[in-house]
Image (cartoon, coloured by chain):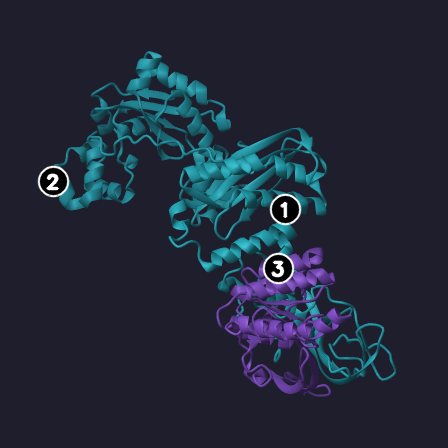
């Protein structure tokens, strides 16, 4: 049977979470999963926080506990550098889950001299990567035995080698808790068994008849028979690309030009793998600090081409420049990392060329690259009371909110009845509403007009009001200080036969006009 | 001297031929109009022509909507305040609407680029040099895209001058706007004027 080396990093999820959030590993930290504690750091465990505990109970035991949701993607992401390091020492890694991997032991033990030497080499190489200190290694016949051997080690004795042929005896001594299927362990305990050896001693046919396929697999594992073969994962190709500028560049067009080759290479690598990228992250580094100066995720309705990628880099830099500008320092590095990739076959154009929408997208993207990211917009009607809330505009290519997120079909009491105005002002201009004595009409604290509107001045010119209605109060989101609005709406028609919608909030502003 | 006398009838003849050609080449492709406008445009709007709709964005949007309902894409250029909700209620499919809020200096080139894919474009006219107008008109004719302009335009095929005839639903301190009546005067280039009624609700 194949000799297998299993490497186990205890508490990997916790380490990944504290790395990701930049937390101090000595502080109490726990990961939650569906309202219960999934894993707890040693500091938290000292306070009595144990896996399986309810979150509220855990907080009760340890009030200064940091709680984070358990995230398998984060675990995998953080494990990536460790995997690469393992691959440098022993190639052909089979990842069981982030934090637990298996490799074939025969080759490395020949290469490094012995199994102990191979294990020591691996441990020395890995120590320090991703703050990894506690590493456990088990070597045994078959993958399951090796994994169990690794998990049976202590921090003081991090290596356990089961001699060839000794796996069955080693497994037989283990308690039933090591079984993956805890409900099976419960049933076995009720049947009077205490160790894995008792379970392994049962006749295979009867175990299968009683516990089905899952039971049979567990029985084979308990017997030390290799069930899951070792499948070395081919390492995923490195798709992230970066370009360094030395000395740093401080002009957007220079940077964009310098990124062209990188963008072509990025897309060519993807195309070579028969992949396309529909979402990517662009990170920019400046001379001022070693940390990233800004990153942004860009989405594409189909998939990026190299020119579109360069456009995104340009827009990101331009956008940063126009605002408070973290990019006043020269740019030293631009990094492009794919976030969402898809198989190219599902994005291939048809045999008779691209569809009509494809052509439209192509043309519009060209216009957009000339006018800037916000130069071409797509639109939707959303839910809301104010007209500006009801009009959703997004740059072409960015995803519009889904129908559910728009909530346009909800009643929205206080929204405008009747005709919708054909002009909704992006930048509402201040107007004046005057009474018969040409004094400004305002609103009382009770939301009533101080006088009837008789004159209306959209600019310096004063017009007579021929019809009006209101004020219609809009009081929304009083619970949220940032989104709280308290406005009153007035609809009026002037003697130029123009109809207006006005909003009063300290002063009158034109919200929209019926043109 | 004699040559000048000779050319005069030729010119008129050529003009007539050009006009015949212009109308013949676009006789196939037509942009539909709302039923209330069929008396002025019995065959719909001509593809590749420009129309000025002065005084009402609502009417221009209604023309856009009629085309959008046939399943075509539409473009709106230079109107940052365009009310998409009103457009959607009139029948413009927002999923097939391209908005270019501010084209600035590149107004003519943006419209020229849009003509490649969009059969009906609504635009706020910008200050454009006469030779660019001619080039744009040629481009529109070639691509068969109709351009609707919200203001006066030097070489418009027809001008629709809109005046509001009254509003319904709003009183002095009560009610809300439910309906508006428009009076439209259609002037075809070098032709007679005709007036129509249009109700927007």
Chain rendered purple: B
Q: Is residue B8 left or right of residue A408?
A: right
Are the two marked residues, 2 and 1, in contact with CB atoms closer than 8 angstroms? no
Q: Quadrant of the N terminus of chain A?
A: top left
Q: Nearer the viewer, mark 2 or mark 1?
A: 1
Q: Position of residue A41 (x, y in %)?
A: 47, 35
Question: SS at mark 1?
Answer: helix
- Residue at image coords 47%, 27%: A132
- For the question of whether residue A504 can be seen, the reply is no
User: Residue B112 bears which disc, if any?
Assistant: 3
Which quadrant of the structure image shows residue A463?
bottom right
Q: Which residue is mark 2?
A: A205
Q: Position of residue A154 (x, y in %)?
A: 38, 24
Give the answer, above or below, for where A154 lies relative to A179.
above
Q: Is residue B35 left or right of residue A209?
A: right
- Residue at image coords 71%, 47%: A322
Which quadrant of the structure image shows residue B135?
bottom right
Give the answer, above or below, for where A314 lies relative to B146.
above
Look at chain A in the picture and name its colour: cyan
- For the question of whether residue A435 can be seen, the reply is yes
Q: Which residue is mark 1?
A: A315
Question: SS at mark 3?
Answer: helix
Q: Chain of mark 1?
A: A
Which of the two labelled residues, at mark 2 and mark 1, occupies the earlier sequence position? 2
Question: SS at mark 2?
Answer: helix
């Amino acid at each position: 049977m194949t000799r297998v080396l299993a490497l186990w990093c205890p508490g990997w999820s916790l380490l990944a979470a504290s790395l990701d959030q930049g937390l101090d590993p000595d502080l109490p930290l726990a990961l939650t999963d569906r309202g219960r504690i999934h894993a707890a750091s040693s500091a938290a465990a000292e306070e009595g926080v144990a896996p399986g505990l309810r979150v509220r109970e855990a907080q009760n035991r340890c009030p200064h506990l940091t709680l984070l949701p358990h995230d398998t993607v984060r675990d995998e992401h953080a494990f990536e550098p460790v995997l690469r390091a393992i691959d440098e020492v022993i190639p052909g890694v089979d990842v069981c889950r982030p934090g637990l991997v298996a490799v074939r032991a025969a080759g490395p033990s020949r290469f490094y001299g012995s199994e102990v030497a191979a294990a020591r080499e691996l441990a020395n190489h890995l120590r320090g990567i991703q703050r990894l200190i506690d590493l456990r290694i088990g070597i045994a016949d078959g993958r399951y035995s090796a994994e169990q051997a690794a998990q049976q080690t202590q921090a003081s004795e991090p290596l356990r080698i089961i001699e060839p042929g000794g796996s069955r005896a080693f497994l037989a001594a283990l308690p039933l808790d090591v079984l993956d299927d805890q409900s099976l362990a419960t049933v076995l305990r009720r049947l009077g068994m205490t160790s894995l050896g008792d379970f392994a001693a049962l006749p295979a046919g009867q175990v299968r008849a009683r516990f089905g396929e899952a039971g049979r697999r567990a029985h084979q594992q308990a017997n030390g028979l290799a069930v899951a073969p070792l499948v070395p994962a081919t390492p995923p190709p490195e798709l992230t690309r970066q370009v360094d500028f030395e000395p740093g560049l401080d002009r957007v067009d220079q940077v964009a030009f310098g990124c062209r080759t990188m963008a072509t290479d990025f897309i060519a690598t993807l195309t070579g793998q028969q992949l396309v990228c529909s979402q990517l992250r662009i990170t920019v580094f400046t001379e001022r600090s070693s940390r990233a100066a800004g990153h942004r995720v860009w989405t594409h309705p189909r998939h990026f081409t190299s020119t579109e990628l360069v456009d995104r880099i340009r827009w990101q830099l331009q956008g940063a420049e126009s605002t408070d500008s973290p990019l006043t320092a020269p740019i030293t590095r631009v990094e492009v990392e794919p976030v969402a990739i898809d198989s190219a076959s599902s994005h291939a154009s048809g045999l008779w060329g691209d569809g009509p929408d494809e052509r439209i997208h192509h043309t519009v993207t060209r216009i957009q690259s000339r006018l800037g990211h916000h130069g071409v917009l797509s639109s939707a009607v959303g839910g809301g009371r104010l007209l500006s809330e009801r009009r959703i505009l997004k740059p072409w290519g960015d995803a519009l909110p889904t129908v559910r997120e728009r909530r346009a079909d909800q009643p929205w009491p206080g929204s405008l009845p009747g005709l919708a105005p054909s002009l909704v002002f992006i930048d509402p201009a201040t107007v004046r509403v005057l009474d018969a004595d040409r004094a400004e009409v305002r609103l009382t604290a009770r939301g009533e007009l101080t006088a009837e509107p008789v004159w209306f001045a959209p600019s310096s010119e004063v017009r007579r009001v021929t019809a009006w209605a209101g004020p219609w109060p809009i009081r929304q989101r009083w619970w949220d200080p940032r989104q709280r609005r308290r406005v009153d709406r007035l609809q009026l028609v002037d003697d130029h036969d123009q109809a207006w919608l006005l909003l009063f909030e300290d002063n009158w502003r034109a919200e929209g006009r019926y043109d | 001297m004699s040559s000048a006398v000779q050319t005069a009838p030729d010119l008129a003849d050529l003009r007539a031929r050009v006009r015949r050609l212009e109308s013949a080449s676009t006789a196939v492709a037509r942009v539909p109009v709302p039923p209330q406008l069929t008396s002025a445009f019995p065959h719909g709007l001509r593809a590749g022509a420009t129309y000025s709709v002065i005084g009402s964005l609502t009417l221009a949007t209604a023309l856009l909507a009629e085309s959008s309902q046939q399943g075509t894409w539409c473009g709106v250029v230079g109107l940052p305040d365009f009310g998409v909700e009103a457009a959607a209620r009139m029948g413009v499919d927002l999923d097939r609407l391209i908005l270019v809020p501010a084209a600035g200096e590149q107004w003519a080139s943006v419209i020229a680029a849009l003509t490649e894919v969009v059969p009906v474009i609504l635009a706020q006219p910008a200050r454009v040099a006469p030779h660019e107008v001619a080039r744009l008109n040629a481009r529109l004719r070639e691509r068969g895209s109709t351009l609707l302009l919200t203001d006066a335009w030097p070489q418009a095929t027809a001008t629709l001058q809109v005046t509001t005839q009254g509003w319904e639903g709003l009183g002095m301190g009560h009610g809300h706007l439910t309906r508006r009546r428009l009076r439209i005067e259609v002037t075809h280039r070098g032709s007679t004027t005709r007036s129509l009624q249009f109700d927007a609700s």
